[in-house]
Image (spheres, rainbow, N blue to C red):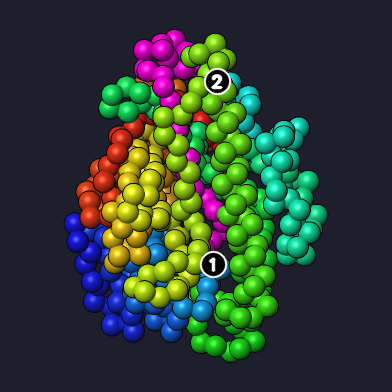
Amino acid sequence: MAAETLNLSTSKPVLSWAGHPLGPSETQMAKNVASLPFVFKHVSLMPDVHLGKGALVGSVIATKDAVIPAAVGVDIGCGMAAVKTPFHADQLDGKLKQIRRDIEAKIPVGFNQNSDVEKDATNWQRWRDFKDLHPGVKDLEGKALKQMGSLGGGNHFIELCLDSEDAVWMMLHSGSRHIGNKLAQCHITTAKELGKLAEEKLPDLDLAYFVAGTPEFAAYWRDLQWAQQYARVNRDVMMARFKAIVEQHLAGGKPTKPLLSVNCHHNYAEQEVHFGEDVYVTRKGAVRARREDYGIIPGSMGAKSFIVKGKGNTDSFCSCSHGAGRQMSRTKAKKQFSLDDLIAQTEGIECRKDKGVIDEIPGAYKPIEAVMSQQSDLVEIVATLRQVVCVKG
């Protein structure tokens, strides 16, 4: 599938892998971003693209000497981790319900946090930099410590999966928790205030930005990198706990060596080189997919997920989609679907089946197979997974 160049009459082109026309609000959001003077080359839209705040979720924005905090978003460093284990499906017989219960008992979900802080969290070297973060988070160090190794809510999840050869995989989706959200909000507020002071006519105030070389840019970039690393370590801490639970049930507690481990962001910004130039790349709901990069593209609870390897497509700024992408809002999903629908759509999966997760029903998401078919030029599929246990906040 090659990208389509959208006819939006903007100063920079918009390349789309969506395979379908954008809605009016989505089109306007794409035009707003592509009209910014510091956008580099073009804007790339991934197959799972949908409405976000300021910029579309599923967009890749390369910029010269500027970065847009709201385009990165409030869940800084949100992403995925997956581990292929040496275990096989038949070892799971009769154990799924207890594995789920143990996960829920040992990994806090929703707004919950750890009652005790373990060494995997306290040993993180970047705690020493907490004092340098934005003044607005000075009172949150204790909370950040206790939330490291916790899942959060919404579309975050922990899953036990099987691939097409019935090998057992562990997979989870989470980000930088409350501390990342708060840091993002502090800097987004500053960017908007600067935009108003400059009286610059932005197409959307959520596209307020920082210019490289300014103190505000330096402060945001420092906090962004800290939060992104926090998110990555948060996933590592949870995965270690998850692995110990699985090993307890399947190997009598004996440690095992992962056959493959992947940990990747899909809400973040980095400095990279593209088309021979140094640029800032913001992936808002997109995964880096350089040649040989491993990535994770999950479906909804009840749908397939994919472990992929990047093809290094330059037009996408070496990126791919981050999931299926919502096709309806949470509010609409709650109105349209019933508890019976949720039970039917998650048949055979050990998971919550209550009204509290109806907004996460598979029917609220785009079909993952259609999303994958649109990005065969961006990634190759390494493994196709189906979940047998799903834990949500």
Q: In which quarter of the view is residue 13 placed? A: bottom left
User: Closest to the observer: 137 or 8?
Assistant: 137
Relative to 216, is 27 on the left or the right?
A: left
Is 136 drawn above or below residue 393 in the view shown? below
The range drawn in magenta is 72-99
Is 368 drawn above or below residue 54 in the view shown? above
Is 48 drawn above or below residue 27 in the view shown? above
Relative to 20, is 350 on the left or the right?
A: right
Q: Position of residue 66 (x, y in %)?
A: 52, 77
| Label 1, residues with CA under 10 Å away: few <14, some 14-19, many ≥20 | many
Locate the C terminus by quadrant.
top right
Residue depicted at 64% across the width and 73% down the height = 218
On whether residue 95 falls in the magenta region, the answer is yes
Is 15 drawn above or below residue 127 in the view shown? below
User: Closest to the observer: 138 or 50?
Assistant: 138
Q: In which quarter of the view is residue 240 placed? A: top right
Closest to the camera, between mark 2 and mark 1, is 2
Q: Position of residue 124 (x, y in %)?
A: 69, 45
Q: Secondary structure at mark 1?
A: helix
Q: Is residue 112 visible?
A: no
**Rendered image: mark on residue 255:** 2
Q: Position of residue 252 (x, y in %)?
A: 54, 11
User: Closest to the observer: 34 or 220?
Assistant: 220
User: Amino acid under label 2?
Assistant: Pro
Q: Secondary structure at mark 2?
A: loop
Residue depicted at 61% across the width and 88% down the height = 198
**Residue hosting label 1:** 70
Q: Is residue 198 visible?
A: yes
User: Closest to the observer: 155 or 91?
Assistant: 91
On whether residue 156 falls in the magenta region, the answer is no
Q: What's the CA distance linking mark 2 and mark 1?
A: 41 Å
The answer to which of marks 2 and 1 sits earlier in the sequence is: 1
